[in-house]
């Protein structure tokens, strides 16, 4: 039997007898009881009643061992049920006594007492993360007392119970753990089978929560800065097109998917780590501080293209990739042969395919500019059709303007209708594909697609089809 199982499932007299049998083995080790300098001990129990019992047993054992020399203030239960718990915690942290704290979950996290040198586990836990949090209470340095090591007392054999899980590195509660390490742990099949910190949860649930938190901190900070930073705004837009979700809401989507499907998402988006690193780089010096204050000098300006040193080599490899993939990717075939029928989901698949192979819209734009000395803001669809068909590369903004000219000329629109069409055109400049579902979501506060259809005289579908036709017509 172990401390957690007994405390939960048996009578108090059984637990009492069990702990009495263990106390004599602890007594010969005075450092456990705070007798060396100002060392502290922390004892983890299963329940509040369990903690009460351990406090009584320790008091009795110490009085028997040290008689009148025993200071009763040295042992205190510190749980949510304790009187004046905040004052108890402050005394435990800042004063000589209590030197031994008995807790359940209250002191497992969020408390910094560097003088803790002894951890006693009188309970088992099912979660590696919680176990590591408990261990973390003793890992702080304490130069004031010359602390060089800390000791773990494990009468319930918690280490053996968690051995298989504890060999899984990294520790997800380590503040220095990277997104890459968390992803690796999420994808480890053992994470799905190992128990988590909550009932009916797995270790993978805990890892996913930690991963989501790290992503949230990065992407929400990027969101807040995007309002005044065009480069960050463009990067987030690119990621939204690749991921199919607003970057600031990615952590929510992964949480909703659960660890198994979130793992599938990570596998599909193989460049996720690199993409988050790129966002961090754009966020600037808070994460990447200056390490030198010497005067900078520009020696050379160069642009790398993955495995290719020259932009023409990069573009040629892109052209070859498109031609090679045309018969393998249904979405690519639609881009080349029937762009007016391309769906948002297919466009997402295309972007993902290209991104996984090192071809992003931003890199293609840069390579084209450096090769031709022309800054052409063509869409990814334009680059694909240029590679596959030799079609002229036209700025997407011009394509939109030309398409809308055709729409404006096709009917005698009223001023109100014209204003709505202009709103559509502005969205098209960012979305590339506008279909009824997008219109319904984007203009939900104004009645959605149903209201717009009414304003346009029940011609919304007709207008969307005409825009798609005009966009990809080559100029005469």
Image (cartoon, grey):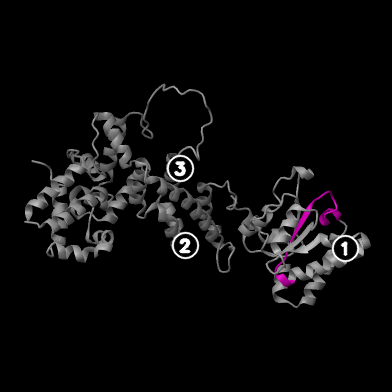
Question: Is residue 321 rendered to the left or right of residue 264?
Answer: left
Question: Is residue 13 rendered to the left or right of residue 344?
Answer: right
- Ranked by sequence position, the earlier of labels 3 and 2 is 2
Distance from Cα at disc 3 to Cα at disc 1: 55 Å
**Callout 3 touching callout 2 (CB < 8 Å):** no
In the rendered view, tell whether residue 114 sits above or below residue 21: above
Q: Quadrant of residue 307?
A: top left
Res 311 seen here: yes
Mark 1 secondary-structure assignment: helix
Q: Position of residue 23 (x, y in %)?
A: 84, 64
Residue for point 30% across, 38% down: 364
Q: Dividing the image into 4 quarters, which one contains the N terminus?
A: bottom right
Q: Position of residue 167 (x, y in %)?
A: 63, 53
Label 2 Cα neighbours within 10 Å, binned few <14 / some 14-19 / many ≥20: some
Residue 39 falls within the magenta-colored stretch: yes
Q: Which residue is mark 3?
A: 280
Span highlighted in magenta in the image? 29-49
Question: Is residue 36 rendered to the left or right of residue 290?
Answer: right
Residue 409 falls within the magenta-colored stretch: no
Residue for point 81% across, 50% down: 38
Q: Which residue is mark 2?
A: 258
Distance from Cα at disc 3 to Cα at disc 2: 25 Å
Indicate which disc residue 118 carries. none
Camera-near label (3 vs 2) is 3
Q: Which residue is mark 1?
A: 62
Q: Dividing the image into 4 quarters, which one contains the C terminus?
A: top left
- Ranked by sequence position, the earlier of labels 2 and 1 is 1
Res 187 seen here: no
Residue for point 39% across, 52% down: 247
Residue most extreme to the bottom: 11
Mark 2 secondary-structure assignment: helix
Camera-near label (2 vs 1) is 1
């Amino acid at each position: 039997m172990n401390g957690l199982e007994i405390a939960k499932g048996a009578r108090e007299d059984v637990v009492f007898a069990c702990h009495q049998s263990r106390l004599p083995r602890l007594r010969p080790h005075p450092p456990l009881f705070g007798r060396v300098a100002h060392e502290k001990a922390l004892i983890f129990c299963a329940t509040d009643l369990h903690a009460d019992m351990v406090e009584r047993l320790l008091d009795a054992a110490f009085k028997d061992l040290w008689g009148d020399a025993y200071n009763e203030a040295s042992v205190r239960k510190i749980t949510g049920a304790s009187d004046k718990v905040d004052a108890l915690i402050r005394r435990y942290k800042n004063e000589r006594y209590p030197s031994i704290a008995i807790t359940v979950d209250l002191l497992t996290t969020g408390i910094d007492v560097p003088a803790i040198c002894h951890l006693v586990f009188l309970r088992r836990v099912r979660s590696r993360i919680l176990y590591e949090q408990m261990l973390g209470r003793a890992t702080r340095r304490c130069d004031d007392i010359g602390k060089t090591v800390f000791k773990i007392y494990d009468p319930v054999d918690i280490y053996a119970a968690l051995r298989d899980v504890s060999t899984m590195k990294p520790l997800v509660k380590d503040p220095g753990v990277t997104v890459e390490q968390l992803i690796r742990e999420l994808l480890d099949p053992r994470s799905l089978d190992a128990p988590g910190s909550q009932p009916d949860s797995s270790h993978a649930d805990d890892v996913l929560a930690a991963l989501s938190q790290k992503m949230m901190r990065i992407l929400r900070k990027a969101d807040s800065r995007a309002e005044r930073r065009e480069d960050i705004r463009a990067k987030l837009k690119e990621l939204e097109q690749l991921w199919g979700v607003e970057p600031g809401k990615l952590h929510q989507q992964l949480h909703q998917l659960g660890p198994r499907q979130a793992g599938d998402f990570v596998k599909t988006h193989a460049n996720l780590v690199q993409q988050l690193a790129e966002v961090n780089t754009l966020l600037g010096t808070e994460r990447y501080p200056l390490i030198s204050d010497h005067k900078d000098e520009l020696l050379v300006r160069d642009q790398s293209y993955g495995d290719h040193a020259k932009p023409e080599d990069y573009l040629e490899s892109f052209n070859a990739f498109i031609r090679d993939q045309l018969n393998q990717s249904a979405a690519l075939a639609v881009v080349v042969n029937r762009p007016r029928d391309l769906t948002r989901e297919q466009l997402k698949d295309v972007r993902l395919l290209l991104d996984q192979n090192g071809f992003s819209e931003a890199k293609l734009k840069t390579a084209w500019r450096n090769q031709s000395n022309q800054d052409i803001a063509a869409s990814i669809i334009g680059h694909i059709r240029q590679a596959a068909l030799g079609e002229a590369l036209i700025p997407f903004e011009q394509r939109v303007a030309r398409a809308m000219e055709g729409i404006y000329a096709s009917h005698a629109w009223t001023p109100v209708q014209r204003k709505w069409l202009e709103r559509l055109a502005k969205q098209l400049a960012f979305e590339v594909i506008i279909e009824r579902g997008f219109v319904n979501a984007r203009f939900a506060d104004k009645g959605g697609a149903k209201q717009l259809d009414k304003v346009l005289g029940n011609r919304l579908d007709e207008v969307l089809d005409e825009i798609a036709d005009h966009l990809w017509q080559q100029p005469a």
